[in-house]
């Protein structure tokens, strides 16, 4: 098992996904410094807002290791970073450092394999292109989108759709994108009626 620093957030990230975060707390700035100094990833983990007992109980089992692809000093003591998801991990236990930084005992969890887009699924990529055009700040994170890879397209939809965390976890723990493909077709066709 590995020990991985965790950054809890409501902006979800999966392998191949990119997101921008603003780090303000000392514990997260330390996480970033240590990650860059040792060339080790930290993980983005979802916050399950339906759990209210404690911060630790709000973290579901599957998180995503990431690498920093850009960072900028923002105003005051804020640091803006852009990260890319690289590898899913399963969290087996979480502890807190003295400064409150979460650390997860983790093992690797299989990423979905790249899969060629079928003709019947191309509408999922087309709708994602339209979404990126309507939200240029998100589209700009992807200078080379993988429109022909159904796995990549499905993972972007899981990140973007306003689904409850346990539904997202259900989708990402599958062996492949098949359940997500069915879900997206059903979602888009029911919204057209």
Image (tube, helix red, strand yellow):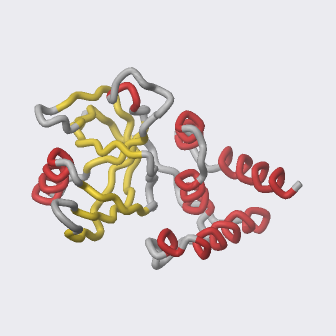
- Work out whether 168 lies above or below 24: above
Residue lying furthest right: 193
- Can you give x and y, in whole percent of width and height, for residue 52 in the image? 42, 25
- Work out whether 11 lies above or below 90: below
- Work out whether 129 lies above or below 63: below
Residue drawn at x 61%, y 73% is: 134
- Horizontal placement of 121 versus 153: left or right? right
- Horizontal placement of 100 versus 133: left or right? left
Looking at this view, is 161 or 158 the one in front?
161
- Horizontal placement of 116 versus 187: left or right? left
Residue drawn at x 40%, y 30% is: 58
Which quarter of the rendered picture does the N terminus lie within?
top left
- Can you give x and y, in whole percent of width and height, for residue 32 in the image? 19, 55
Residue lying furthest top: 53
Residue lying furthest front: 76
Looking at this view, is 165 or 107 the one in front?
165
- Can you give x and y, in whole percent of width and height, for residue 83 in the image? 33, 62
Which quarter of the rendered picture does the C terminus lie within?
bottom right
Residue 55: which quarter of the image? top left
**Exactly how many numbered labels are in the figure?**
0
- Horizontal placement of 126 versus 20: left or right? right
Residue drawn at x 38%, y 46% is: 9
């Amino acid at each position: 098992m590995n020990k991985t620093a965790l950054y809890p957030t409501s902006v979800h990230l999966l392998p191949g996904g990119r997101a921008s975060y603003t780090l303000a707390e000392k514990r997260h700035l330390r996480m970033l410094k240590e990650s860059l100094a040792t060339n080790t990833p930290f993980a983005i983990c979802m916050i399950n807002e339906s759990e209210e007992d404690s911060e630790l109980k709000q973290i579901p089992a599957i998180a995503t290791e990431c690498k920093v692809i850009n960072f900028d000093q923002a105003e005051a003591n804020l640091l803006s970073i852009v990260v890319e998801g690289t590898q899913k991990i399963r969290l087996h236990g979480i502890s807190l450092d003295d400064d409150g930084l979460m650390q997860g005992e983790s093992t690797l969890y299989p990423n979905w394999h790249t899969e060629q887009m079928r003709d019947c699924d191309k509408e999922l990529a087309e709708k994602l292109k339209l979404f990126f055009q309507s939200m240029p700040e998100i589209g700009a994170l992807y200078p080379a989108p993988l429109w022909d890879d159904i796995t990549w397209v499905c993972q972007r939809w899981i990140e973007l759709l306003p689904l409850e965390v346990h539904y997202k976890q259900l989708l990402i723990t599958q062996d492949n994108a098949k359940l997500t493909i069915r879900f997206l077709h059903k979602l888009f066709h029911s919204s057209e009626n």
